[in-house]
């Protein structure tokens, strides 16, 4: 089945030690998103890629970066994780944005990576 | 973005209908109403969407008020598997990135 895959499902890092989370998709979608979800809170959009175009949300900390080397893969880099960055990180995809392909573009989510910062 | 207001939590008995309300009094003419749900320990998943008319699919029904300032997600027969957080989201022209509000946590009692 076509899907959104996130590895690893659980990641433990140390305070200040850079960490990379990965997302891959077999849907061949143009758009990939990263969300942060802290305990008992709603998912918060960090940024998204439309093809190679990167779109950062205004309140996303500089500590968070992203790379999309090809259509299938997208990475979330946290340069110096703090205790406050412990969260579930969700990757999502959609075929297109803004109805360019016509119709409503559903977002498909991966299962998430739960990040613990020690 | 136009905001939505949902109750924090609701409870339902198994196999009974559930009506999940959402208020969106500042909705604009180009905003689509989307519902996603998040089952425990999973990413959110699409449920249904609509613009003006009521909508039905295999998962649920969406009833939209005539003035579009409110809507209701209807689960016709709740099952234990429907226990989740349900998010009502407005999307301009239907396709801006999803911006989640607090949602309604639905508990289903056997």
Image (cartoon, coloured by chain):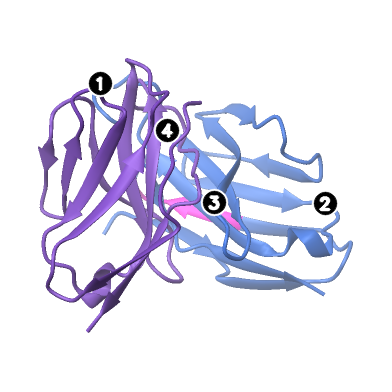
Q: Is residue A23 magenta?
A: yes
- Image chain in purple: B
- Real-space Cα distance between discs 2 and 3? 21 Å
Q: Which residue is mark 2?
A: A79
Q: Which region of the structure is painted magenta?
A: A22-26
| Chain coloured blue | A
Query: Do the residues bearing badges 1 and 3 touch, measured as CB atoms within 8 Å?
Result: no
**Chain for mark 2?**
A
Q: Secondary structure at mark 1?
A: loop
- For the C terminus of chain A, which image quadrant? bottom right
N-term-proximal mark, 1 vs 3: 3
Query: What residue is disc 4 on?
Result: A30
Work out whether disc 1 and disc 3 sit on a shared chain: yes
Q: Which residue is mark 3?
A: A43
Q: Report the Cα–Cα distance between label 4 and label 1.
A: 14 Å
Crowdedness near tag 4: few (<14), some (14–19) or many (≥20) residues, C-alpha within 10 Å: some
Instruction: Give A27 or A35, whichever is nearer the viewer.
Output: A35
View extreme (bottom): residue? B110
Q: Nearer the viewer, mark 3 or mark 4?
A: 3
Return the x and y of residue B94 as percentages of the image width and height: 33, 26
Expressed as whole percent of the image width and height from the top left, the position of residue A13 reads 78, 70
Chain-order first, disc 2 or disc 4:
4
């Amino acid at each position: 089945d076509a899907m959104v895959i996130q590895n690893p499902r659980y990641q433990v890092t140390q305070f200040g030690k850079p960490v990379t989370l990965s997302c891959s998709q077999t849907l061949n979608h143009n758009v990939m998103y990263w969300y942060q979800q802290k305990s008992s809170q709603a998912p918060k959009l960090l940024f998204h890629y439309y093809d190679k175009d990167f779109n950062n949300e205004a309140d996303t900390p500089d500590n968070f970066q992203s790379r999309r080397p090809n259509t299938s893969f997208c990475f979330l880099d946290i340069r110096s994780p703090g205790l406050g960055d412990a969260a579930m990180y969700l990757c999502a995809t959609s075929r297109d944005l803004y109805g360019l392909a016509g119709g409503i573009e559903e977002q498909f989510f991966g299962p998430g990576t739960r990040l613990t910062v020690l | 973005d136009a905001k939505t207001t949902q109750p924090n939590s609701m409870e339902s008995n198994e196999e009974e209908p559930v009506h999940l309300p959402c208020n969106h009094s500042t909705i604009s003419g180009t905003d689509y109403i989307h519902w996603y749900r998040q089952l425990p320990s999973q990413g959110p998943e699409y449920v249904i969407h609509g613009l003006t008319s009521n909508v039905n699919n295999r998962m649920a029904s969406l009833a939209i008020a005539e003035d579009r300032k409110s809507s209701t997600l209807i689960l016709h027969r709740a099952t234990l598997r429907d226990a989740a957080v349900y998010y009502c989201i407005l999307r301009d022209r239907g396709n801006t990135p999803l911006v989640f509000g607090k949602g309604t946590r639905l508990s289903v009692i056997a």
